[in-house]
Amino acid sequence: MTIPESQKRIRSRETSCVELIQQTIADIKKRDTFNSLITLTEEQALAEARERDRELVQGKDRGPLHGVPIAHKDLFYTRGVRTTAGSLVYKDFVPDYDATVVERLRAAGAISIGKTNLHECAYGIASKNPHFGFVLNPCDPKRLPGGSSGGSASLVAAGFLPMALGTDTGGSIRIPASYCGVAGIKPTYG
């Protein structure tokens, strides 16, 4: 489901934010054989979805991302959520603040369902993570999704999410996007 499709269903009351997040998480639990996620934040996502539904009832609309599910590459700091960078060195690290982009996406109404798998410390183009498992390409599970944002591209390509956050210094969004047949955007600095 695309962002506009999600918005149409939420605004028309065809579905609630809670129902959309529940469907997304159930679908991931049932079909994600691609090792796309390191951490699933089901309870936190449902709490945010309940808040987004309350806001709509009160007439507060955060805009085009209101209630839309997203996942963040497990490199982005997320307050209160384990952030491993795909490495055992950080396996128990829990930041006490959000990265700016995470904070802004939350303020825009997006609901994070978890942290995506990646090439360890985002240092590679294969997303072959020896600690949290290799990410597989949903277009052909015998192939790699590319890296380092392979989990993010995999979730979008499998149709679990309309968008996911990655990072890109030397192709780490663009390579997985091209391998998985989805659009990947590397924004300019700043």
Image (cartoon, rainbow, N blue to C red):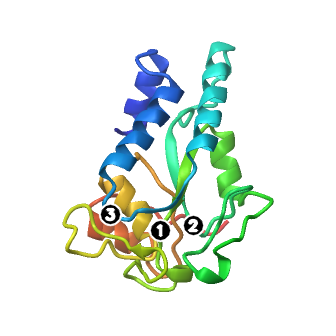
- Gap in Å between the C-alphas at discs 2 and 3? 16 Å
Residue identifier under label 2: 74
Does 10 appear above or below 184? above
- Mark 2 vs mark 3, foreground winner is 3
Please state the horizontal and vertical placement of residue 48, each as a whole percent of the image. 64, 36
Do the residues under discs 1 and 2 have CB atoms within 8 angstroms?
yes
The amino acid on which the numbered mark 2 sits, given as a three-letter code, is Asp
Residue identifier under label 3: 34
Residue identifier under label 1: 117
Residue 160 in sight here: no
Helix, strand or loop status at disc 2: loop
The amino acid on which the numbered mark 3 sits, given as a three-letter code, is Phe
| Label 2 or label 3, whichever comes before in sequence order | 3
Of residues 130 and 172, the one drawn nearer to the viewer in this rendering: 130
The amino acid on which the numbered mark 1 sits, given as a three-letter code, is Asn
Q: Is residue 22 left or right of residue 96?
A: left
Choose top left, top right, bottom left or bottom right for residue 83.
bottom right
Crowding around mark 2 (Cα neighbors within 10 Å: few <14, some 14 to 19, many 20+) is many
Question: What residue is at 22 percent from the left and 68 percent from the top?
Answer: 141
- Gap in Å between the C-alphas at discs 3 and 1? 10 Å
Crowding around mark 3 (Cα neighbors within 10 Å: few <14, some 14 to 19, many 20+) is many
Q: What quarter of the picture does the C terminus occupy?
A: bottom right
Question: What residue is at 30 percent from the left and 69 percent from the top?
Answer: 136
Please state the horizontal and vertical placement of residue 173, each as a whole percent of the image. 44, 69
Question: What residue is at 60 percent from the left and 70 percent from the top?
Answer: 75
Residue 15 in sight here: yes
Helix, strand or loop status at disc 1: loop
